[in-house]
Image: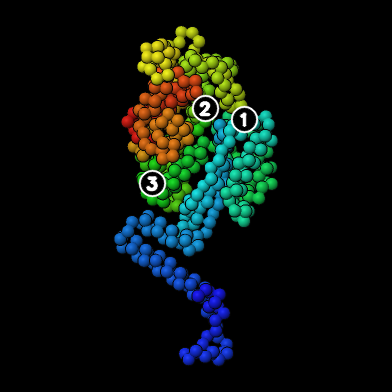
Amino acid sequence: MTNNELRRRKHKDQNGRQAPNKKRKEIKPSTIHRSFFCLIISGTILTLFILLYIDNIPWHLGHKAVDSIAKKFGYHKLVHAVVIDAGSTGSRVLAFTFHESYLGGHLVLDKELFKYTKPGLSSFADNPKKGVATIANLLEEAKREIPEKYWNKTPLILKATAGLRLLPQEKAENLLNSVREFFNQTPFLTSEDSVEIMDGIDEGIFSWFTVNFLLERIHGNPAKTVAALDLGGGSTQVTFSALTPASLSQKQYIHQAVSPNGLIPVYTHSYLGLGLMAARKEIVTLNQPNQVNVTSECINHIIERRKFHFGGRDYYVSGLQENYPTSKTAGNTYSVGQEVPVVDFQKCSKIITDYVIAKAKPPEELPSKVIFAFSYYFDRATEVGLIDENTGGQIDVNAFKTAAEKSCAEPNADQPFMCLDLTFIWVLLEKGFGLRGDAKIF
């Protein structure tokens, strides 16, 4: 019998006769159902609390179980946010959907949208309107992800990183003001601080917080948190919870990160100019100041005038055209024993090492940490098959060195900068950050 039939049916007495017409409150079955379900969920949550209290199940498993049940019964409050990362090589939009945990009230990530566009906002320093158009296209993606009824309650922010930090101040401000004007016309929740250049300190802390939030380590003991290595285009950041006197004594790099359990002293160091693209530009233009047609020891002879765009400028990069190194191949693309042009790995790594050690100083505590690396670390590792693009994985520092040596020994017109990029990553990790060759990286 359906609920509607139940609502239409009149009460009858025990003999089947219609009951006298009395004023009495009718209890709707839907109300009974809701009360019954509330009783079920309340009882289940109470049971889980008791089990948690007596340590019969691990806290994090019980927490997830309660959250899962509460979500199914609509006890969650949804929270949305839209973040645009205006990096040096591209802009990315991230539209997040969280729910407030039924226990504790902290946010739990349900899903996220990630879309990106190239080139970065800084490439439009002379044409801000065109730069704003790229941001507008990204925001349309976010609108499709977040229901319209939530737009006016959804915060929207744009944080620019090293790409804009490297621009002249006037050009950077013109870009930011154009984006601010656009944001004021959107239906999302914005403020005066919604559009700004993020300094390297915040960039490091935010990346560290994000990684540990996703790993569900931000709510516990700071000693259980992981180190975050972020390799961007213009800068790179090293961030970890500072526990040793050696780290804590470097007060210029110690900052207090806000966590659900209070403030955590965090070591973070941002190196402007040690981003992958910034370093690539400095390496290929070495001893060739103000030139756009450049040659480099770290580029194979077969590469001629390959375009490379960085910092609003185009460079045309070639390998050595005279006295370039060669090696006999073992097969594959070329015939066995054929002399092919290669990059001298030792010379290239020496050039890169000199550049890196002039800028980076190894943090003493970093080697003792569990390390997660992302951004260009991840991109290059997937492009040469060190890890799976979808599942990620664990490798050691030496894996980057081995991949670099292999790339430098093989002419590859499709990936003209791979030898340089991989060598830089290996040198940065080992020489710049003081990690051993067998150090594990996730």
Q: Badge 1: few (under 14), some or many (20 or more) residues near its Cα, within 10 Å?
A: many
335 vs 171, nearest the viewer:
335
Residue at x 60%, y 44% (from the top left corner)? 141
Of pointers 1 and 3, the one earlier in the residue sequence:
1
Residue 252 in sight = no
313 vs 383, nearest the viewer:
383
Q: Quadrant of residue 435?
A: top left
Q: Which residue is mark 3?
A: 222
Q: Badge 3: few (under 14), some or many (20 or more) residues near its Cα, within 10 Å?
A: many
Cα distance in 3D space between marks 2 and 3:
33 Å
Residue at x 47%, y 55% (from the top left corner)? 106
Q: Amino acid at mark 2?
A: Met
Q: Badge 2: few (under 14), some or many (20 or more) residues near its Cα, within 10 Å?
A: many
388 vs 397, nearest the viewer:
388
Of pointers 2 and 3, the one earlier in the residue sequence:
3
Q: How many marks?
A: 3
Residue 406 in sight = yes
Q: Amino acid at mark 1?
A: Ser
Mark sitting on residue 123? 1
271 above or below 186? above
Helix, strand or loop under label 1: helix
Q: Amino acid at mark 3?
A: Pro
Helix, strand or loop under label 3: helix
Of pointers 1 and 2, the one earlier in the residue sequence:
1
Residue at x 47%, y 16% (from the top left corner)? 300
204 above or below 405? below
Structure colour scheme: rainbow
| Most distant residue in the top direction | 323
Q: Which residue is mark 2?
A: 277
Helix, strand or loop under label 2: helix
Cα distance in 3D space between marks 1 and 3:
39 Å
